[in-house]
Image (cartoon, helix red, strand yellow):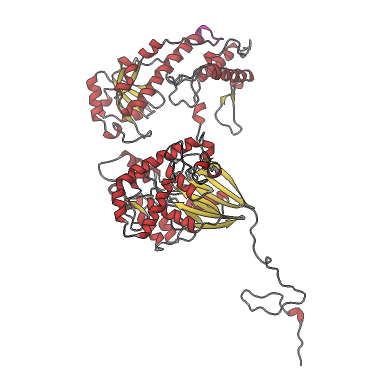
């Protein structure tokens, strides 16, 4: 029996990988752009800084910012399992202090110090420097492409393994002086040019422990002049006028004049940098932050002079060392040409190239880079990021930052505010937070008028931590009308406003009448020690030996973060100081997080410049502000008691009285 074909049983599709058959009747071939997945909408590039080894956060930040790519500006966390043994003690303490991977209790133990090195006190498992080993073994994967330069705290051995392809991580691309990257996104060709490491003038000719062209050692890395020369060569080889150039650095071109000039030589449209560890990002061009072109030239001239000092010192050693290496001679030549183009003085030279030199070109400056090259300085990844949104050839920006917390300014209130009825003096946030003062409309108008008059009529005081107090309001200034039904409430409001206005905005050392209602002991009568950067009496007392704790007469507050520890005799004071650890008696660098103890000695103000030790200038200024604030507040209090419904000018001091007042200085 013959069988017939049944067309309706023929499948209308083919399995994946199956051989293609004849076209079905009625079908037509696809056009070139049909059958493809075309991404629509903008492309987002996340720009972040200083993840410090917390590499899992890259995926989290990419999801949060809806990013397709990531650009990272250094301190990535290029440490492997062998890096710990190569890091010196000082660098290890710095890395551990800011590492998001090391537990807080270990950080505190490291900061407190000890007789033995950190490596001997903790096991390697307690000091995780980076999650890079998890990327290397595939346990953690990067979900979007990441383009990064190295920072100041990295292991040069690890970077050399990446450059030699011994280490490979999917979606991780390192851009440096020899390798640039091109992203074609959103109708824009984005050329990434990178330079990693810290910029230190006296290390520009030092290779450190680097075995190739990169420099570093003992857990840190820096930039060399040869790297700058090679970056110029790379940028010239890949130059395409249709591309948009992005210069990615760890150090900020705004602070390093040689980097600023390098960005001009690279013809960069944008620079993205970090290394300043701010909580807010910044966006600027040179035209917006320099009043004149001469001012900008002055910054470059200072950087050139600093470089020339180093170059003249090492020139006799560098040139013979590279005499047999023609490639390095060319790189050095490229870098020196960048420096030669930098102006020597603020009044001459064109840092941007421009017209040919000659009499006809005098006074002509090509300011295109001065106005058009845009710079972004990023906050740390913990606090914020920058997102570039690219669509239809346009590059938009979105900058986000966690920012500072200013809630402490409204947390403390004057005792007089307690007498004000809650309905009239406080307002509650929708979420149910702490009540905050809510001035009436008339009070707001009074404050506004006062600020306007005070700013135009009162010269600023340079020796006082106070803003022009509320007692400087003129008599014709509108005043809030007191309600007969609640005279005590109106008086309390006025008293609270006067007390609040006596402290300048942002003043860190303003007096707090709620906690220091009594006048301080006269400075000339104090026998004690001045303790800076400490706010708690118990913490201050814990600094001293048990033998000395019993000899402490009292601990007196002296500003927001300072204390004065009183003793009966100078001998007891000196003995207590001698028994303190060296960590609280010395400070090698500016560090406002650690306590610092000095002898409290009253000196005359006119002798301050002669006798103050260099590291005690800030103490003298802080104590001088405290005395001025205390005197002004006492005078304001007397005026308020005599005239509760009027605000008058405080008594003005004579010049001789100001010069003869006593300030406290720590030696």
- Out of 139 and 397, give the one closest to the viewer: 397
Q: Which residues are magenta?
A: 640-650
Quadrant where the C terminus sits is: top left
The answer to which image quadrant residue 610 occupies is: top left
Q: Tell me which residue sits at (28%, 29%) in the image.
A: 544
- Out of 461 and 8, give the one closest to the viewer: 461
Residue 329 lies, with reference to residue 400, above or below; the image says: below
The single residue placed furthest to the front in the displayed view is 359
Residue 139 lies, with reference to residue 120, above or below; the image says: below
- Out of 407 and 315, give the one closest to the viewer: 315
Question: Looking at the picture, how far across and down is residue 659, in whole percent?
Answer: 37, 14
Q: Tell me which residue sits at (22%, 25%) in the image.
A: 575
Q: Is residue 320 visible?
A: yes
Question: Looking at the picture, how far across and down is residue 336, in whole percent?
Answer: 39, 49
Quadrant where the N terminus sits is: bottom right
Q: Tell me which residue sits at (52%, 38%) in the image.
A: 363
Question: Looking at the picture, how far across and down is residue 559, in whole percent?
Answer: 40, 23
Whether residue 261 sits left or right of residue 386 in the image: it is: left
């Amino acid at each position: 029996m013959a069988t017939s074909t049944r067309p309706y049983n023929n499948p209308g599709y083919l399995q994946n990988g199956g051989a293609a058959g004849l076209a079905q009747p009625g079908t037509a071939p696809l056009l070139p752009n049909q059958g493809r997945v075309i991404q629509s909408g903008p492309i987002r590039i996340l720009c972040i800084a200083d993840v410090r080894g917390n590499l899992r956060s890259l995926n989290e930040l990419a999801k949060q910012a809806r990013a397709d790519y990531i650009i990272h500006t250094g301190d990535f966390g290029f440490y492997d399992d062998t890096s710990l043994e190569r890091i010196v003690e000082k660098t290890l303490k710095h890395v551990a202090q800011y590492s998001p991977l090391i537990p807080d209790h270990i950080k505190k133990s490291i900061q407190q110090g000890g007789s033995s090195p950190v490596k001997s006190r903790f096991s390697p498992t307690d000091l995780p420097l980076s999650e890079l080993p998890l990327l290397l073994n595939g346990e953690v994967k990067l979900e979007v492409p990441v383009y990064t330069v190295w920072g100041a705290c990295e292991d040069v051995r690890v970077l050399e393994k990446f450059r030699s392809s011994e280490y490979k991580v999917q979606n991780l691309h390192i851009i440096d002086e020899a390798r640039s990257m091109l992203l074609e996104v959103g109708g824009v060709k984005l050329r990434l040019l990178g330079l990693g490491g810290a910029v230190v003038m006296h290390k520009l000719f030092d290779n450190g422990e680097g075995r190739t062209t990169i420099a570093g050692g003992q857990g840190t890395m820096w930039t060399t002049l040869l790297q700058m020369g090679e970056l110029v060569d790379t940028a010239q080889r890949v130059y395409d006028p249709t591309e948009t150039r992005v210069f990615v650095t760890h150090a900020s071109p705004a602070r390093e004049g040689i980097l600023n000039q390098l960005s001009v030589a690279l013809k960069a449209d944008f620079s993205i940098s970090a290394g300043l560890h701010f909580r807010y990002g910044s966006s600027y061009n040179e035209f917006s932050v320099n009043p004149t072109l001469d001012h900008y030239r002055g910054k470059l001239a200072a950087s050139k002079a600093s470089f020339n000092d180093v170059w003249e010192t090492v020139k006799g050693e560098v040139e013979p060392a590279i005499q047999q290496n023609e490639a390095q001679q060319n790189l050095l030549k490229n870098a020196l040409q960048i420096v030669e183009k930098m102006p020597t003085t603020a009044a001459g030279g064109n840092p941007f190239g421009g017209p040919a030199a000659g009499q006809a070109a005098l006074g002509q400056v090509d300011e295109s880079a001065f106005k058009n090259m845009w710079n972004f300085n990023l906050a740390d990844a913990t606090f914020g990021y920058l997102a570039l949104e690219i669509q239809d050839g346009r590059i938009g920006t979105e900058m986000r930052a966690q920012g500072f917390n200013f809630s402490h300014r409204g947390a403390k209130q004057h005792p007089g505010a307690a007498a004000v009825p809650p309905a009239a003096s406080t307002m509650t946030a929708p979420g149910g937070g702490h009540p905050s003062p809510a001035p009436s409309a008339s009070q707001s108008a009074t404050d506004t008028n006062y600020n306007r008059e005070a700013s135009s009529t009162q010269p600023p005081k340079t020796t006082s931590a106070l803003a022009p107090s509320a007692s400087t309001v003129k008599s014709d200034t509108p005043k809030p009308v007191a309600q007969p039904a609640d005279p005590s409430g109106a008086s309390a409001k006025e008293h609270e406003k006067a007390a609040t206005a006596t402290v300048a905005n942002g003043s860190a050392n303003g007096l707090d009448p709620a906690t220091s209602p009594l006048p301080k002991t006269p400075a000339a009568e104090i026998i004690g020690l001045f303790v800076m950067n400490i706010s708690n009496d118990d913490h201050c007392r814990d600094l001293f030996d048990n033998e000395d704790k019993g000899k402490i007469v009292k601990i007196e507050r002296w500003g927001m973060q300072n204390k004065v520890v009183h003793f009966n005799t100078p001998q007891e004071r000196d003995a207590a100081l001698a028994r303190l650890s060296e960590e609280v008696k010395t400070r090698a660098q500016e560090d406002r997080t650690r306590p610092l103890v000095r002898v409290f000695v009253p000196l005359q103000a006119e002798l301050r410049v002669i006798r103050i030790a260099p590291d005690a200038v800030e103490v003298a200024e802080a104590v001088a502000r405290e005395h001025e604030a205390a005197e002004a507040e006492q005078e304001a209090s007397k005026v308020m008691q005599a005239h509760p419904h009027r605000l008058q000018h405080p008594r003005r001091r004579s010049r001789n009285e100001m010069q003869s007042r006593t300030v406290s200085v720590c030696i």
